[in-house]
Image (cartoon, rainbow, N blue to C red):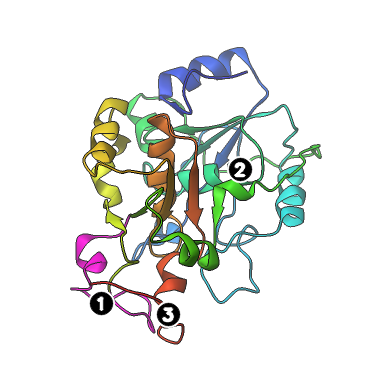
Amino acid sequence: MSFKSALICPDELQKALGQNEDIILLDCTIDKVGQSIKDMKLELLPNSQFFDIEGKLSDDSSKLPHTLVSEKIFEEEMQVLGIDQDSTVVLYDRWGVYSSPRAWWMFRVMGFKHVFILNGGVLAWKKNNYPLVGSYIENEKTGNFKAQFQENHYADKDYVLKHYRDPDVNIFDARSRGRFNGLVPEPRKGLHGGHIPHAKNLPFEELFNDIVYKSTDDLKLKFDHFKSTGTEYVFSCGSGITASILAFACHLTGHEHIRVYDGSWSEWGREELNLPTEK
């Protein structure tokens, strides 16, 4: 089972679910700053499981938030969810589109390509009056998923430090303009204000019409506006979540040389590291 685009609408998914019972649905919702999923009514697409970005799928030994887990842990957790090498996986979240692109990038960096995002998530699904449930299913099958780490989709501090002046590498920052320019304080303590030198600022909210991604043509215009010179794109934000929103949009416009800086500003901006910074 496959779709024409990595981004699918509710009608496409509903039709596909009626034809194929093997689609695996994953709720990828995480907290936002000042907003907790614990305060939300649990509304899910039927037959969903939870993709636990902030818990099982973040490295709890790291001082940084949302750090990618090891290849081994990711593989084991996906097998627990019943995912096979030939499975079709559809991701969504309850905010609209927020954390599902982070899950998409995690699958891609682990070598799995049969993964799609529901545009608008649960909110768009509800607008179409499609059914919702209030609980996850309990999977009883162990999948044969195999993780194969793709280094060309991943960036760490050392990679960014080596390439931030490289004209062939375009660095985009998904944070607000105030944070990018160091005009408003960071929400996390112990961080400098500002941005990685030579980075371009594209706040993630600018890629949406309400709860859904803008058209591919409009997304292309957003990236073309910067007249980027390079063929590789590296995306950063506060902790790697909204950077993935940009990375997925860039993928939709046809680019494949895409990396997410996993540590993002939570690492680069740390006062004790004193890495190159601009305001």
Q: Is the magenta stretch mostly helix, strand or loop?
A: loop
Within-10-Å neighbours for mark 1: few <14, some 14–19, many 20+: few
Residue ID at (61%, 46%): 109
* In this view, 218 is above or below 69: above
Q: In this view, does 172 lie to the left or right of 23?
A: left
Q: Which residue is drawn at 75% across and 33% down?
A: 84
Which residue is tagged 2?
A: 107
Q: Quadrant of the C terminus?
A: bottom left
At numbered mark 1, what does the secondary structure look like: helix, strand or loop? loop
| Range shown magenta | 174-193
| Image height of 173 relative to 186, above or below | above
Say which amino acid is labelled 1: Pro
Distance between mark 1 and mark 2 Cα atoms: 32 Å
Q: Which of marks 3 and 2 is nearer the N terminus?
A: 2
Q: Name the residue under label 3.
A: 270
Front residue of this view, candidates 235 and 22: 235
